[in-house]
Amino acid sequence: MVVTVERTEVSPDRMVLDGQPVESWIESLAPGDAWFRMLQGRMPEEGERRVFDGVLVALTDHGSTPPSTQAARLVASAGVPLQAALAGGLLAFGDHHAGAIEGAMALFQEEVARPGPGGAAGLAERALEEGTRIPGFGHRVHRRDPRVVPLKRLGEACLVRSPHLDLFRSLEEELSRRKDIGGNVDGVCGALLSDLGFPPQAGRALFFAGRLPGLTGWILRETRGRAFRPYALVPREGVPCSA
């Protein structure tokens, strides 16, 4: 069960976060530790820390074509403050961009918690019969998302228990065998975040936490050009932009 930090005390010349003075956080915590502590009310173990950091790094950027990057660049070109352009990028996170991580987390957590038989084969069979997509699989740009393998290796090496990652791997094997569909970054990150104890509702926030450096970099580059600078977007073979 996730327990978020609810006790932040602020008084003149004093701040206490989760029972500890802010000075101790500043001196000892990495950014990922602070995210983990604020959302779960506990510090990550060393293996969990490495996996969580890996997830945030994997989400850092995906080039100029994702909707959030396009939105942030367009807003930035109007001459607004940086935070307004970042807000434009954040508002572009929806069901078709950045939302699959939340859907994957909900699906994996429901399936792992389900009593009795089930698992990857049944999920894959139902999806193929109904013609529906399983969130976290397939990609509009990559046939094999290059972020998936290193994240799986990290989870396998660093987590004591990884039932959600095991389900993701089994689903990937089923879908690859039947339809040559691979897993994507949303799927593997959703599995790892589930194994780390995060609820599905946190998925998009953590996606944004990872993507924040990339969006900021694109905004800063955009503002170095002339105002409202036009630019061309030419996705590979006319394929729409992806996450």
Image (cartoon, rainbow, N blue to C red):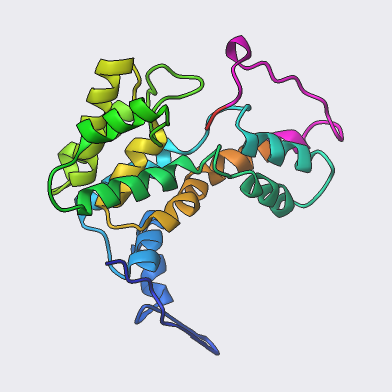
Please give left or right for residue 24 compared with residue 236 in the image.
Answer: left
Residue sitting at 13 percent across and 43 percent down?
Answer: 117
Please give left or right for residue 75 compared with residue 215 in the image.
Answer: right
Relative to 235, is 23 above or below? below
Residue sitting at 81 percent across and 38 percent down?
Answer: 77
Residue 208, image x and y in percent?
Answer: 52, 48
Relative to 132, is 232 above or below? above
Residue 57, image x and y in percent?
Answer: 41, 39
**Which is more toward the observer, 24 or 186?**
186
State how many labels appear: 0
**Which is more toward the observer, 38 or 225?**
38
Q: Is residue 231 magenta?
A: yes
Residue 136, image x and y in percent?
Answer: 39, 35
Residue sitting at 39 percent across and 54 percent down?
Answer: 200
Relative to 86, is 15 above or below? below
Q: State the image quarter where residue 40 is shown.
A: bottom left
Please give left or right for residue 87 compared with residue 61 in the image.
Answer: right
Residue 138 visible from this viewpoint: yes
Q: Residue furthest bottom?
A: 12
**Which is more toward the observer, 127 or 97?**
127
Residue sitting at 37 percent across and 19 percent down?
Answer: 144
Q: Quadrant of the N terminus?
A: bottom left
Residue 154 visible from this viewpoint: no
Residue 18, image x and y in percent?
Answer: 36, 78
Q: Would you say the magenta stretch is mainly helix, strand or loop?
A: loop
Q: Which residues are magenta?
A: 221-241
Q: Residue furthest top?
A: 237
